[in-house]
Amino acid sequence: MPELVQQQPIEKPPRSRRAELITFFVLAFGIWPIVAIGVVGGYGFLIWMLQIIFGPPGPPGH
């Protein structure tokens, strides 16, 4: 057990600026727009289905 305490933690090499920029651009212009379109589309689909079941908004009978 003392051997485990004496060992130095393995340090990861620092990420390069290029790798961080690539990650940022993939998230900013790839993944997040797809997620946003999916969320807005899902919300629109939910509203559409609710209107099919319960009718459009407004006073009843008009």
Image (tube, rainbow, N blue to C red):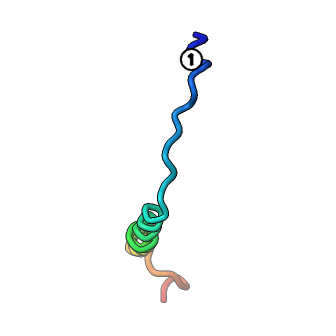
Residue drawn at x 41%, y 74% as measured from the top left: 29
Along the line of sight, which residue is nearer the eye, 45 or 49?
45
How many marks can you see? 1
Residue 27 visible in the shown view: yes
Residue 53 visible in the shown view: no
* Callout 1: SS: helix
Q: Quadrant of the N terminus?
A: top right
The residue under label 1 is 4
Q: Residues within 10 Å of mark 1 (few under 14, many from 20)?
A: few
Residue drawn at x 38%, y 70% as measured from the top left: 30
In percent of width and height, residue 35 lies at 42, 67
In percent of width and height, residue 45 lies at 39, 71
Residue drawn at x 57%, y 28% as measured from the top left: 8
Along the line of sight, which residue is nearer the eye, 12 or 38?
12
In the drawing, does residue 5 fall left or right of residue 35?
Answer: right
In the drawing, does residue 41 fall left or right of residue 14?
Answer: left
Give the residue type that dot 1 points to. Answer: Leu
In percent of width and height, residue 5 lies at 61, 18
In percent of width and height, residue 15 lies at 49, 54
In terms of image quadrants, where is residue 19? bottom left
